[in-house]
Amino acid sequence: MKTIFRYIFFQFFPPFFIGYGFFTLVLFIPTIEKLVSLTIEKGIPFLVTAKLFVYALPFVSVLTAPMGVLFSGLLTLGRLSNDSELIALRANGFSVWKISLPAFTYGILMSVFMLWFMNYVLPESNHRYKLLLTNATFSNPIIFLENKDFREIPNSNKKITSLEYDPEDQSMKDVYLYEKNENNEIRLIFAKNGQWINNTINSENIQLELKTGELIHFDMKENEILDLGEFDNLVVNIKNQITQYDKLDRGLREQGALEVLEVIEKKKSQNLPVDPIFFVEYHKKISLPIACVFFMFVAIPLSITLNNRSGKGISFGVALVVIFIYYVFLIVGETLGKKAIISPSIGMYLPNLVIFIIGSAFFLKIIRQ
């Protein structure tokens, strides 16, 4: 049994890397295009783009690793079934459960690894990606001016747009700057010309020089104009408090499950309302990694039932169908959970339950045989 266990167990890893690599490449293509354009079109240093690439990879990996587990399960067990090795094992007294033990062990180990990865590696990579991209944005404002709509200047309460932008000298024409402070006061500035000054990566103080324009300072609370005037030259100072090495406040996707749970418990202790999205993110950080076990649970009976005579093609096709079903229920559950239409825990564990039901139906069929 030990020999057979080792033989089957180590068969899963080569196809896992093939499946993981394929699905990661497919889902990562839009990100690759975006990052390449930062260097080629927007002049961001290649080293910065390379770091962004590394930091973005874990986000895709948490989605594609379970896919790779399913693909490896279907392909490996399908090959064993196609070569009649599973039939030989069952003919020699090995039950379906004994044959399945290496597969379940593989699925459990992958789930444990993904739990660690999603709750420690992914939050840190997401955080570093946000910091570095924000910092790079300061060095080349065309990143958030290219669509000609109001975009927030990172780490500030200002939004800006420009109808024309020259990337060579970073000058702008027809500039609109919108700012809202804590007192519910709005300042709207229009300038015919503008230019970014001292906005290199990791600059502490960035300046936006505006020329020939008008401004209006409005109090929304009192519904009155506080200031109205024209200017020939106006310099707006922006404090850049973000560098790629900073440790700033983290969003939900930049925290592990225990950190999110700590925030939830803190809000409850202070009798503050807890948005359902907190519960969704908490359960998602657990349900997605343990999907590896459930994918193996459905891969085992499917491989034996299908008797993979058609080779790798049918394994790939079945993997796509199961993955499609899983992620449809994941998206639906997440959406309903965030809107509190259903319990966030039910919404996030629903896809695993669906896969478990499908796997159970096929397992019962095999046992009856």
Image (cartoon, helix red, strand yellow):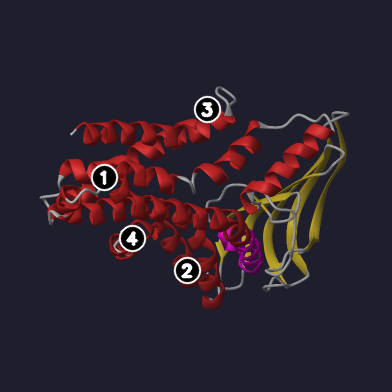
In the rendered structure, does residue 53 fall within the stretch colored magenta? no
Q: Work out how far the residue at label 1 is from the one at label 4, CA to CA, in angstroms.
A: 16 Å
Task: Look at discs 1 and 4 and give the one toward the viewer.
Answer: 1
- Residue density around tag 2, few if under 14, some if 14–19, many if 20 or more, within 10 Å: few
Task: Look at discs 1 and 3 and give the one toward the viewer.
Answer: 1
For image coordinates 51% across by 73% down, the residue present is 50
Nearer-the-camera pick, 259 or 109: 109
Work out which quarter of the rendered image holds the C terminus and state it. Answer: top left
Instruction: Report the residue marked by disc 2.
Output: 41
Residue 245, located in which quarter of the rendered image?
A: bottom right
Query: Would residue 142 be visible to someone looking at this image?
Result: yes
Residue 38 image offset from top left, x and y in percent: 50, 67
Task: Look at discs 3 and 2 and give the one toward the viewer.
Answer: 3
Residues at circles 2 and 4 in contact by the CB criterion of under 8 Å: no
In the rendered structure, does residue 136 fall within the stretch colored magenta? yes
Q: Work out how far the residue at label 4 is from the one at label 3, CA to CA, in angstroms.
A: 38 Å
Q: Work out how far the residue at label 1 is from the one at label 3, CA to CA, in angstroms.
A: 41 Å
Q: Secondary structure at mark 2?
A: loop
Residue 162 image offset from top left, x and y in percent: 61, 54
Q: Secondary structure at mark 1?
A: loop
Instruction: Report the residue marked by disc 4.
Output: 9
Q: Secondary structure at mark 3?
A: helix
What is the magenta range?
A: 127-143
Instruction: Report the residue marked by disc 3.
Output: 336
Rendered view: 42 above or below 278: below
Work out which quarter of the rendered image holds the N terminus and state it. Answer: bottom left
Nearer-the-camera pick, 205 or 63: 63
The residue sitting at the top extreme is 341
